[in-house]
Image (tube, rainbow, N blue to C red):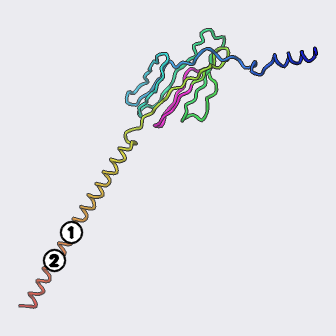
Amino acid sequence: PLRRQRQMCIRDSFKADDLKPEPSPYQPTLTAYRILDKKVGHETIHQLPAGWEGPLVLSPSVVYCAFDFTVPDFFAKDERKYQTFLEGFDPDWTAQTTTPSIRYTQLSPGEYTFNLQGYDGEGRRTAKMREIKVLVETPWYLTYWFFAACLVCLGWLIYAIYHYRMGQLRAQMETTRRFQSLELRSLRQQLNP
């Protein structure tokens, strides 16, 4: 009976979940985003208020967009680490890094989701992940209405060329008909003096 009690005590006191570290109580925070817009000509920094949820809308003239972030662990023993993943662009999460920013260059038009995972100074992963929608607008020359307008213009151009060419052929036929008519009249006058 004592052996059985000892086995039960050992079996009940150890669980695999006990080896997992507790998640960090801190949340990763986006502090700012930076963009380089061809129209502006220089990088602009946009500070973000706490709890900002987005979405971030980028014009097609944006050359790059960079996100600055942190994990507000002010009592960290070691450096904080970060992982990011831009759904629709990155194939997978980036490797852990201590650099608190990431830059994305020449994003294609579309919808993306920026995901941020942080690790505090003790190496604990944050319980919550930060997600922000990123929308890159389509340039005007790639929109459906532009293609429709091009098709209408192309149709009008084909019609105008066709109409112009048909006018040329009619004029040529009329000139040929008049010439033949004059020739026929001349032949009749020669036959009937």
Distance of mark 2 from mark 1, alpha carbons? 14 Å
Q: Secondary structure at mark 1?
A: helix
**Quarter of the rendering containing residue 170:** bottom left
Judge depth for marks 2 and 1 and give the one in front: 1
Residue 67 placed where, x, y %?
51, 24
Q: Is residue 61 left or right of residue 74?
A: left
Amino acid carrying label 1: it is Arg
Number of marks in picture: 2
Element under disc 2 = helix
Q: Is residue 37 magenta?
A: no
Location of mark 2 (residue): 179
Q: Is residue 105 above or below residue 49?
A: below
Residue 76 pos. (x, y %): 64, 11
Residue type, label 2: Phe
Can residue 103 be found in the magenta stretch?
yes
Label 2, residues with CA under 10 Å away: few <14, some 14-19, many ≥20: few
Tell which of 22 and 78 is nearer to you. 22
Q: Quadrant of the N terminus?
A: top right
Residue 50's x, y, as percent? 49, 16
Quadrant of the image occupied by residue 181: bottom left
**Residue, disc 1:** 170
Q: Residue at x 21, y 65 (%)?
A: 167
Q: Residue at x 54, y 19 (%)?
A: 69
Specify the farthest residue to the left: 193
- Residue at (66% x, 11% y) in the render: 77
Residue range in magenta is 99-115
Residue 30: x %, y % from top left:
52, 20
